[in-house]
C-alpha cells in the first residue's frame, strides 16, 4: 500500500499521549502546538501510527515512501527520518515511549493510540438511537390514525435530539479549544518553533564553493546548510549532487539513479553543512568531458532525506595557471 492510499483510508485523527496526528493535513500537534517535522519523518510516523503495536519492516516503509525506486541510499534516508521523528517526539531510542526499534527488522509504534470520531458519526449514532427508542414506544400510539401521528412525533423527536446533540458538540468543541489554548500557552516556552512552521532548515542552500580547477583530481569544499546526511553506497557515486559544465554542455554526478552520467563525482564526506569532493572520475578527460579554464559551472544539491532542492550555485573554472 502506498503512503497516499494509507492516508485516504483513514478518517478522523490519531491521538497518543499529548500528540495529535492529522494524516490528511500532514500535521503533528503537541498540546495544540504544531510540531515542525520533515516530510519524510512525518510520513514514517503516519505509517507506524496506522499500525500500532505491529512490526513495520524497513522494506515496507521503503516501498511506501519511495515506490518504484530500485536504487538509492534508503538506509541513510530512513535513519535520518527516524532520527528527526524521535527528536520531535522527544523519544529515546534506548528507552522508547513511542517508536521502538526492532533490530535488523524495522520499527514498532508502542504508544497507546486513540482515534477521534468525526462529528458526523456522533450525530448519526445519536439519531439512530432516537429512532430506536421511538420505535419501541407505547402500543397506544398505533391506534386510530397511528401511522400519521407516530410519524409526526418521530420526526419532531429526532430533529430535537439532533439539535440538542449539535449544541452539545459545539459546547464540547469550545471547551476543548479553550483547554488547548491554555495548554498551548503552558508549552509555549518549550516549543522550539511557532505554529506556522516551514521546512526552511531542510531546504539546501549553498553559501560558498572553493575554486574548481581544470583537472580530474582536486579538493572542492561546498559549504552551506540543509544538505542532509549522506553516506555513499558506491565509491564513485554521488546521488543528489551534480556539477554541470554550462559552457561545455555536460554534467558530472549521478543526481538520480536514472541519470547514468559518464563522469561521476567522488564524495569524500557529506554533512548537513559541508560537502567535500575529492575529484572527478569515470570518463573524465575523454571526448569533450573535461573542464577548461573560464568554463561556467553550476553546482546543484538536493537534500537526500527531504528531497528538497535543488539549490544552485554558479562558479567559473579557475585558469590553468592556478592549477600549478
Image (tube, grey):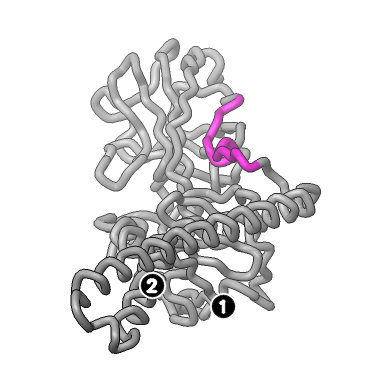
Residue 219 point in image, percent of width and height: 56, 34
> Which stretch appears magenta?
195-207
Q: Is residue 56 magenta?
A: no
Q: Residue at x 51, y 15 (%)?
A: 318
Q: Is residue 245 above or below residue 192?
A: above
Quarter occupied by residue 239: top left
Q: Nearer the viewer, residue 21 or 307?
A: 21
Mark 2 Cα-neighbour bin, 10 Å: few <14, some 14–19, many ≥20: few
Point 55% across, 40% down: residue: 199
Task: Please tell me which residue is depicted at 59% across the width and 60% down the height of the picture.
Answer: 172
In the rendered image, the vertical position of residue 67 relative to residue 100, given as above or below? above
Q: Which residue is mark 1?
A: 112
Considering every residue shown, the one lying at the far front of the view is 144
40 or 53: nearer the viewer: 53
Q: Is residue 75 visible?
A: no
Is 119 displayed left or right of 224 in the figure? left
- Give residue 186's position: percent from left, percent from top: 79, 53
Residue named by callout 2: 125
Of mark 2 and mark 1, the one earlier in the sequence is 1
Determine if the magenta segment contains residue 202.
yes
Image x and y of residue 272, in percent: 60, 43
The quarter of the rendered structure image containing the N terminus is: bottom left
Density class for disc 1 (Cα within 10 Å; few <14, some 14-19, many ≥20) is few
Q: Quick check: 201 above or below 320?
A: below
Q: Would residue 233 appear left or right of 247 to someone viewing this image?
A: right
**In this rendering, does residue 167 appear at all?**
yes
Residue situated in front as seen by the camera: 78 or 296: 78
Secondary structure, mark 1, is loop
Amino acid at each position: 500500500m502506498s503512503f497516499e492510499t494509507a492516508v485516504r483510508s483513514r478518517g478522523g485523527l490519531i491521538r497518543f499521549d499529548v500528540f495529535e496526528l492529522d494524516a490528511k493535513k500532514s500535521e503533528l500537534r503537541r498540546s495544540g502546538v504544531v510540531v515542525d517535522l520533515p516530510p519524510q519523518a512525518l510520513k514514517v510516523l503516519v505509517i507506524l501510527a496506522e499500525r500500532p503495536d505491529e512490526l513495520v519492516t524497513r522494506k515496507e516503509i521503503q516501498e511506501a515512501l519511495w515506490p518504484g525506486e530500485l536504487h538509492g541510499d534508503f538506509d541513510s534516508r530512513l535513519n535520518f527520518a527516524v532520527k528527526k521523528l524521535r527528536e520531535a517526539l522527544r523519544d529515546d531510542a534506548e528507552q522508547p515511549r513511542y517508536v521502538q526499534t526492532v533490530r535488523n527488522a524495522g520499527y514498532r509504534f508502542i504508544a497507546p493510540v486513540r482515534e477521534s470520531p468525526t462529528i458526523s458519526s456522533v450525530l448519526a449514532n445519536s439519531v439512530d438511537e432516537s429512532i430506536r427508542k421511538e420505535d419501541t414506544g407505547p402500543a397506544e400510539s398505533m391506534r386510530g390514525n397511528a401511522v400519521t401521528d407516530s410519524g409526526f412525533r418521530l420526526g419532531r423527536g429526532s430533529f430535537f435530539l439532533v439539535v440538542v446533540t449539535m449544541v452539545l458538540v459545539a459546547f464540547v468543541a469550545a471547551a476543548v479549544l479553550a483547554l488547548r489554548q491554555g495548554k498551548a500557552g503552558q508549552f509555549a516556552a518549550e516549543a522550539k518553533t511557532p505554529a506556522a512552521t516551514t521546512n526552511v532548515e531542510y531546504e539546501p542552500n549553498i553559501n560558498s564553493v572553493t575554486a574548481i580547477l581544470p583537472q580530474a583530481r582536486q579538493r572542492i569544499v561546498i559549504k552551506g546548510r540543509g544538505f542532509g546526511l549522506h553516506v555513499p553506497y558506491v565509491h564513485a557515486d554521488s546521488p543528489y549532487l551534480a556539477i554541470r559544465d554550462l559552457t561545455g554542455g555536460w554534467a558530472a554526478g549521478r543526481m538520480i539513479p536514472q541519470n547514468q552520467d559518464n563522469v561521476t563525482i567522488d564524495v569524500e564526506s557529506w554533512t548537513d553543512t559541508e560537502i567535500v569532493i575529492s575529484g572527478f572520475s569515470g570518463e573524465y578527460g575523454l571526448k569533450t568531458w573535461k573542464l577548461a579554464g573560464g568554463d561556467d559551472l553550476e553546482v546543484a544539491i538536493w537534500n537526500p532525506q527531504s528531497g528538497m532542492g535543488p539549490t544552485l550555485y554558479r562558479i567559473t573554472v579557475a585558469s590553468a595557471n592556478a592549477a600549478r
